[in-house]
């Protein structure tokens, strides 16, 4: 009888140990990486996500936002590899910055593909968006929701730009993406890759003539102060943001907590998208108040720029994926 009791006790202990090992052990704090801090919409989205998760988990799950890509020493192109490797737990990343590791993300950088917000939504909320998310998953990162960095507009210190020939020979600071170089080369400009830390001094001294960024960045960073007195709203590309998690970190959460964190990301993304779009008229008015000449391109003028950059599509479509590009074009045409 004692032997049976001892065996039963040992079995109970083994079951308890096995059950304990199966229980997810949550960290006291999880990291979120972003490139821009508050008051930029990008940083606000991260803070919103962290607040929603803390609130909906009753303080059980806590996120801390690390802006300025500080978890990767400020090198934003290293953010995706760090997220995949587990150096970063969560991130809200730019499709531009993550495109070296996920070529499909270059879809959103194709010049003049998305003429308006409805076109962006047609991609992110449709089959093309799911194809992009699947590509991210295949690289070892779990995508959760979309945000938005906005349309990237063109500013310069030389004059009004309404046609491709206006860019001839103009030195334009661009982000570190070969696709951006190809786009501005196709337009006859002289694209120059440099960090933002180097860009503002270069703009101030005239080492470069112009740059491209969303209106929120132009305004908050006071780009008008470095000689950028002409701004063309040409909507040449948009930069959706992706809320994402490290795969191993994500696997450690319970199904209920996964659902909560993902819904919090969706809600934070929608809040950020709505707010950033609603702010555009005020941003334009503020920028014009600083003495900047703002030019809106007509559909016909944008078509001329699109035609001038068709070589970019010929080169990049095979790298992005012909099926994805065609799905995106159909979604935009049917929006």
Image (tube, grey):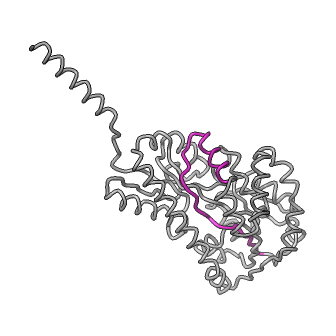
111 relative to 277, above or below:
above
Magenta span: 129-157
Looking at the image, residue 61 sits to the left or right of residue 194; the answer is left
Q: Nearer the viewer, residue 19 or 240?
A: 19
Looking at the image, residue 265 sits to the left or right of residue 231; the answer is left
272 relative to 29, above or below:
below
Looking at the image, the residue that sits furthest to the front is 1
Looking at the image, residue 280 sits to the left or right of residue 245; the answer is right
Q: Nearer the viewer, residue 259 or 41?
A: 259
Q: Quadrant of the C terminus?
A: bottom right
Q: Quadrant of residue 328?
A: bottom right
Looking at the image, residue 185 sits to the left or right of residue 14; the answer is right
Give the total number of marks visible in the rendering. Answer: 0
User: Which residue is located at x 89 percent, y 63 percent?
Assistant: 307
Residue 268 at x, y percent in the picture = 50, 64
Residue 140 at x, y percent in the picture = 57, 39
User: Which residue is located at x 68 percent, y 51 percent?
Assistant: 105
User: Which residue is located at x 73 percent, y 79 percent?
Assistant: 229
Residue 189 at x, y percent in the picture = 84, 63
User: Which residue is located at x 67 percent, y 56 percent?
Assistant: 126
Residue 157 at x, y percent in the picture = 76, 75
162 relative to 291, above or below:
above
Q: Quadrant of the N terminus?
A: top left
Q: Quadrant of residue 129?
A: bottom right
Q: Is residue 228 magenta?
A: no
Q: Nearer the viewer, residue 311 or 208?
A: 311
């Amino acid at each position: 009888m004692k032997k049976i009791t001892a065996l039963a006790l040992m079995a109970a202990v083994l079951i308890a140990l096995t059950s304990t090992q199966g229980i997810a052990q949550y960290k006291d704090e999880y990291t979120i990486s972003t490139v821009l801090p508050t008051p930029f919409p990008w940083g606000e989205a991260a803070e919103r996500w962290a607040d929603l998760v803390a609130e909906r988990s009753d303080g059980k799950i806590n996120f801390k936002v690390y802006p300025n890509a500080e978890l990767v020493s400020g090198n934003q192109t290293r953010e995706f590899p760090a997220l995949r490797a587990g150096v970063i737990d969560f991130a809200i990343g730019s499709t531009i910055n993550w495109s070296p590791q996920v070529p499909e993300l270059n879809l959103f950088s194709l010049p003049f593909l998305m003429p308006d917000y409805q076109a962006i939504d047609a991609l992110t909320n449709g089959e093309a968006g799911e194809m992009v998310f699947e590509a991210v998953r295949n690289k070892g990162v779990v995508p959760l929701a979309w945000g938005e960095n906005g349309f990237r507009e063109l500013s310069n210190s030389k004059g009004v730009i309404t046609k491709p020939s206006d860019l001839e020979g103009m030195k334009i600071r661009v982000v570190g993406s070969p696709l951006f170089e190809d786009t501005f080369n196709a337009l006859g400009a002289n694209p120059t890759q440099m960090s933002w830390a180097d860009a503002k001094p270069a703009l101030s001294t005239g080492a470069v003539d112009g740059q491209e960024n969303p209106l929120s960045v132009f305004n908050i960073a006071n780009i008008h102060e470095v000689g950028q007195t002409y701004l063309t709203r040409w909507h040449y590309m948009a930069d959706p943001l992706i809320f994402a998690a490290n795969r191993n970190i994500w696997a450690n959460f319970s199904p209920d907590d996964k659902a909560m964190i993902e819904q919090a990301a969706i809600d934070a993304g929608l809040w950020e998208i709505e707010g950033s779009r609603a702010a555009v008229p005020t941003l334009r008015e503020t920028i014009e108040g600083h003495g900047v000449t703002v030019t809106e391109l007509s559909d016909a003028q944008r078509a001329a720029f699109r035609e001038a950059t068709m070589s970019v599509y010929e080169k990049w479509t095979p790298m992005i994926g012909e099926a994805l590009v065609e799905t995106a074009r159909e979604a935009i045409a049917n929006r």
